[in-house]
């Protein structure tokens, strides 16, 4: 059955769901890796992200930057700071600068345009990716005239009803229209979505993947949902990394030439960030109501579904369910959909056990003291990354699922912690040393950093 699906020219929603729920997904990973090798080769593109403003006028329910989060200190980087950070990143070897922010009206088209054109005037001018949310067609066109090369706007979920519940400030239709406008203006267009959103089903994930193809996207960021304790989704279960990896692999099959970032929490590269993220969540909960609404902060992870469903219900009422069949399943029958998802995720859990030995060696490496102390640095006494993992077991290569991009924050330390879409603690930024560490690590996985 798998062979039959993998040989098809076009995968449909049922095909994708069938793949996502396989007990043994390894043939799909192998197919994705073959496609990756054939279409984008062994190069791994490194992108430097500057998070230049955490001010946002929207209220996305999963995001720590949403305007209702009054405990978050807000910042805006000055033009000169942004430019200096970009200049350092270019000197360190980055060929792409990603300018990312909340939807902040202070950064008018003119202000943002000035930043883009200043970056494009740097020696060895980099590609510029903008990730600043929804704007007017005129703004998108203006940024292009200033030199912007790519625009990243994740659709987050292709289920219109779920989208409505999570995004009080917009609709899926508006989001997709923006993406099509961006694409029509000649940008390299990026979208993406979260895996594990409350109420999501495997059909939703299939619809997410097919939407990437429909737009069509040349970049796609697919990451696990991580519950932020300072949001209305506090206490929800985090997305499943294995299911996320599967979605990335299928994205590679659907979009052979796309740039697919290795998102955090997916690999040994991200284990450290994942640990920090978990610790940050625990710390925020332990801090109690100083920063966080007490009832949200004290609710144990995974036991909040009753309250949160009630919270989501308010926005669900009266909204029509547009679009997909997955949307209809996850709409008014939200609980039923959740149950369905849980059932399918149980199947994925079985597959995880089957893959356990593969991941064990990667996990051992990520947890070794040397890696922990140095962030991503691999010291002499680490288990070396070799084809056999140094212990006879195959070493997992985090790029073997189809990803070919790594995004690295270069945001100055005084701002980085406050860019809290989800909670995380990060080691200090050293743009040059971080870049070198990443390059070394990528080479050890027999890939070519660029
Ligand atoms: S996801 Fe983006 S638009 Fe939504 S609240 Fe966060 S920063 Fe703002």
Image: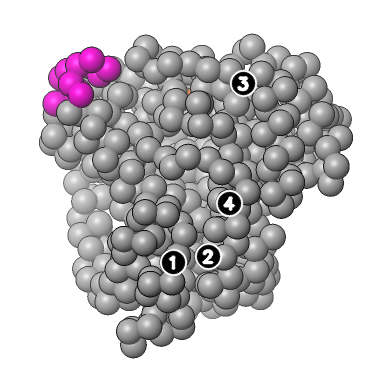
Q: Secondary structure at mark 3?
A: loop
Ligand 1 has an atom within 8 Å of the beta carbon of the residue at disc 4:
no
> Is residue 295 found inside the magenta-colored segment of the image?
yes
Quadrant containing the N terminus in the rendered view: bottom left
Which disc, if any, is residue 441? 2
* CA distance for labels 4 and 1: 14 Å
Which disc, if any, is residue 433? 4
- The structure residue drawn at horizontal position 27% and vertical position 63%, both measured from the top left corner, is 348
Counting residues from the start of the chain, the first of labels 3 and 4 encountered is 3
Relative to residue 381, is residue 292 drawn left or right? left
Q: 415 above or below 271?
A: above
- Specify the quadrant of the image occupied by residue 151: top right
Say which residue label 1 marks.
379
Mark 3 or 1: in front is 1
Q: Secondary structure at mark 2?
A: helix
* CA distance for labels 3 and 1: 35 Å
Residue 345 or residue 271, whichever sits in front: 271
Q: Secondary structure at mark 4?
A: helix
């Amino acid at each position: 059955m798998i062979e039959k699906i993998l040989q098809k020219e076009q995968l449909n929603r049922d095909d994708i769901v069938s793949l996502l729920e396989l007990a043994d997904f390894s043939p799909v990973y192998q197919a994705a890796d073959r496609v990756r090798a054939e279409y984008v080769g062994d190069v791994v593109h490194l992108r430097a992200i500057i998070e230049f403003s955490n001010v946002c006028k929207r209220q996305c329910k999963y995001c720590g930057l949403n305007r209702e989060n009054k405990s978050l200190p807000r910042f805006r980087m000055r033009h000169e700071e942004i430019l200096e950070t970009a200049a350092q990143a270019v000197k360190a070897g980055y060929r792409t600068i990603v300018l990312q922010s909340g939807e902040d009206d202070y950064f008018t088209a003119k202000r943002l345009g000035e930043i883009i054109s200043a970056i494009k005037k740097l020696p060895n001018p980099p590609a510029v990716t903008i990730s600043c949310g929804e704007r007017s067609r005129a703004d998108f066109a203006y940024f292009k005239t200033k030199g912007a090369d790519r625009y990243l706007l994740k659709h987050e979920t292709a289920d219109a009803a779920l989208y409505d519940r999570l995004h009080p400030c917009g609709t899926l239709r508006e989001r997709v229209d923006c993406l099509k406008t961006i694409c029509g203006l000649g940008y390299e267009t990026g979208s993406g979505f979260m895996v594990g959103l409350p109420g999501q089903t495997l059909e939703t994930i299939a619809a997410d993947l097919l939407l990437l193809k429909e737009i069509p996207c040349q970049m796609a960021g697919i990451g696990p949902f991580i519950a932020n304790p300072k949001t209305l989704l506090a206490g929800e279960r985090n997305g499943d990394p294995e299911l996320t990896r599967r979605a990335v692999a299928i994205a590679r099959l659907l979009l052979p030439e796309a740039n697919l970032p290795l998102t955090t929490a997916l690999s040994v590269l991200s284990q450290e960030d994942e640990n920090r993220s978990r610790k940050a969540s625990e710390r925020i909960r332990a801090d109690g109501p100083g920063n966080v609404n007490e009832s949200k902060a004290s609710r144990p992870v995974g036991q909040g579904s009753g309250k949160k469903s009630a919270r989501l219900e308010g926005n669900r009422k009266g909204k029509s369910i547009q679009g997909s069949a997955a949307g209809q399943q996850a709409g008014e029958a939200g609980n039923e959909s959740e149950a369905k998802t849980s059932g399918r995720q149980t199947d994925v859990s079985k597959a995880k056990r089957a893959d356990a030995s593969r991941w064990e060696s990667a996990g051992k490496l990520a947890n070794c003291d040397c890696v922990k102390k140095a962030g991503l640095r691999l010291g002499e006494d680490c288990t070396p990354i070799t084809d056999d993992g140094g212990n006879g077991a195959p070493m997992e290569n985090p790029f073997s699922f189809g990803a070919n991009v790594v995004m690295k924050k270069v945001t100055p330390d005084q701002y980085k912690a406050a860019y809290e879409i989800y909670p995380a603690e990060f080691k200090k930024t050293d743009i040059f040393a971080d870049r070198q560490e990443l390059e070394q690590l990528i080479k050890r996985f027999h890939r070519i950093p660029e």
